[in-house]
Amino acid sequence: AQSVTQLDSQVPVFEEAPVELRCNYSSSVSVYLFWYVQYPNQGLQLLLKYLSGSTLVKSINGFEAEFNKSQTSFHLRKPSVHISDTAEYFCAVREYNAGNMLTFGGGTRLMVKP
Amino acid sequence: KAGVTQTPRYLIKTRGQQVTLSCSPISGHRSVSWYQQTPGQGLQFLFEYFSETQRNKGNFPGRFSGRQFSNSRSEMNVSTLELGDSALYLCASSSTSGGEYEQYFGPGTRLTVT
């Protein structure tokens, strides 16, 4: 069975500073990788995904993540955060042949301070 | 295109009662997945329905059940409610099951069991 570990439960950072949210996964088969963001009292929104091809994937709002197969990691980075990035971020994996079943990490609360 | 809708948004029930939650997927989507989100256990997969058939099931007791109708709308039912069932229940829809298609999440139903 697959598992996902987000190493930091909370990450405080000042506005305009860079940030990295770490995600490691374990799976015996090939997986798709995702980052979702959840704002208070809302559902999950897909931030970015790795399906195949280039290991560096980018979102429209400045986030990027790199798939590292040897280290089984999919860390999320942003070079300069904004107050509006304050939210909870979830890393998730989905096995190729497991339908739409997502396995989530425990989440990382990003707190951007002015 | 309207997003995923979940009803009701908030619900308060008493231990021992049963509850039914509803999810209407995005028009044209045939897959609906359900997740439970709690502070202690995080986001956990409950089940996925595709074309009225259960495709996958998570590790939850038989008190948790679901179904999908011919119009792809889905319901989940929890019988004999326990305090630990208090959670945010999220559903997600996708055009198909598996593959490289994105899942879209609804805002969730917050269930409180007293």
Image: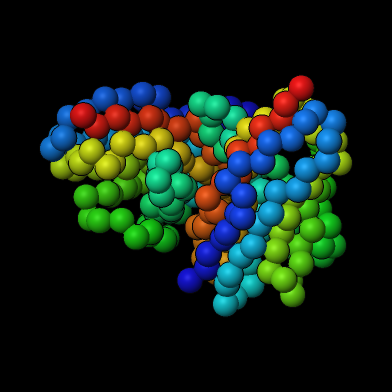
Is B25 on the left or on the right of A10, as rendered?
left
Picture residue at 79% right of the left edge, 58% below the top: A66
Q: Name the spot of residue A69 as percent of width and height, x first.
A: 74, 71
Q: Quadrant of the C terminus of chain B?
A: top left
What kind of colouring is applied to the model shown? rainbow
Q: Quadrant of the N terminus of chain B?
A: top right
Residue B114 visible from this viewpoint: yes
Vertical comparison of B27 with B62: above or below: above
Q: Name the spot of residue B106 as percent of width and height, x first.
A: 51, 34
Q: Name the spot of residue B42 as percent of width and height, x first.
A: 45, 47
Total marks in image: 0
Picture residue at 48% right of the left edge, 71% below the top: A1
B91 or A113: which is nearer to us? A113
Q: Name the spot of residue B52 as percent of width and height, x first.
A: 38, 51
Is A90 on the left or on the right of B86, as rendered?
right
Vertical comparison of B15 with A103: above or below: above
Looking at this view, name the residue that lies furthest to the left.
B16
B44 or B1: which is nearer to us? B44
Looking at this view, name the residue that lies furthest to the bottom.
A28
Picture residue at 56% right of the left edge, 60% below the top: A4
Is A11 on the left or on the right of A18, as rendered?
left
Q: Would you identify the image quadrant in which residue B53 lies? A: bottom left
Residue B73 visible from this viewpoint: no
Is B75 on the left or on the right of A96, as rendered?
left
Picture residue at 31% right of the left edge, 36% below the top: B86
Vertical comparison of A51 with A20: above or below: below
